[in-house]
Amino acid sequence: MVQRIAEKRRKTSETEIFIKLNIDGSGKAKINSGIGFLDHMLELFSFWGHFDLEVTTSEADLKVDIHHTNEDLGIVLGQVFKDALGDKVGINRIGSKSAPMEDVTANVTVDISGRGSFKLSLAMQGAGLSAPQPQDGYELKYAEHFFESFAKQLGMNLNIKIDNPSIDLHATLEPVFKAFGIAMDEATQIDPRRKGVPSTKGVID
């Protein structure tokens, strides 16, 4: 089997990010993005997806805010996945998984179709519930920016629905990243029955 490994260094006037990925790994993570909360979420993604993932941010404008670093991490990770998948011959392409944490359930569906799109929805249950609150400077909107950048760069439909989200951002996003890792593992695995690209068009851009 051809090794599905890729790495990329992206430098802008705002950030310099290096990411190395082995799709067929064992879930080993070495992550130092400068955003501690996101580091933890990516470690969960790596572990549950069985991806070996190395992330280093050597330059970041974190003294301003985390917006650019967070978004650029999504961009580079999407590009690295796209490079590692190559022509996508034999992959399942579609993955859909759910994961709970206490009262929260995250439902994540992916389709590596070549068309990038992203949708996140919160299913609030009961009156008087509040949306997840920021934690350690990280907000739900930052997770949305990260996922949107990832999906567009990879060329993936990514739909996330969070049932009964908690006011605790950690409790809300941890099952999301777990389910995302498992769904991506399913979508990127090789189906031995599939002899070509998983598309009736015969190609995935």
Image (spheres, rainbow, N blue to C red):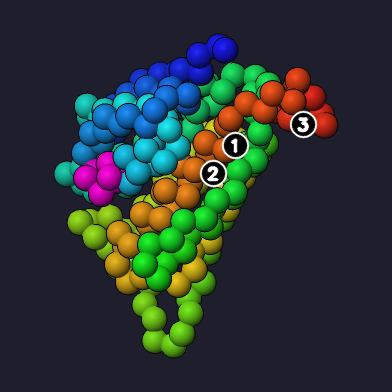
Residue placed most toward the observer, 69 or 202: 202
Residue at x 32% of width, y 40% of height: 43
Q: Residues within 10 Å of mark 2 (few under 14, many from 20)?
A: many
Q: Which mark is residue 187?
A: 1
- CB under 8 Å between callouts 2 and 1? yes
Residue at x 46% of width, y 56% of height: 99
Q: CA gap, disc 1 to disc 3?
A: 13 Å
Tell me the mark number nearer the camera, choosing from 2 and 3.
2
Chain-order first, disc 1 or disc 3: 1
Q: Considering the numbered disc 2 on the image, is that residue within a helix, a strand or a loop?
A: helix
Q: Residue furthest left?
A: 63
Q: Residue furthest bottom?
A: 127
Amino acid type, label 3: Ser
Residue at x 47% of width, y 24% of height: 24
Q: CA gap, disc 2 to disc 1?
A: 6 Å
Q: Quadrant of the N terminus?
A: top right
User: What span is in magenta?
Assistant: 35-40
Is 36 magenta? The answer is: yes
Q: Considering the numbered disc 3 on the image, is that residue within a helix, a strand or a loop?
A: loop
Q: CA gap, disc 2 to disc 3?
A: 19 Å
Q: Which mark is residue 183?
A: 2
Q: Is residue 118 visible?
A: no
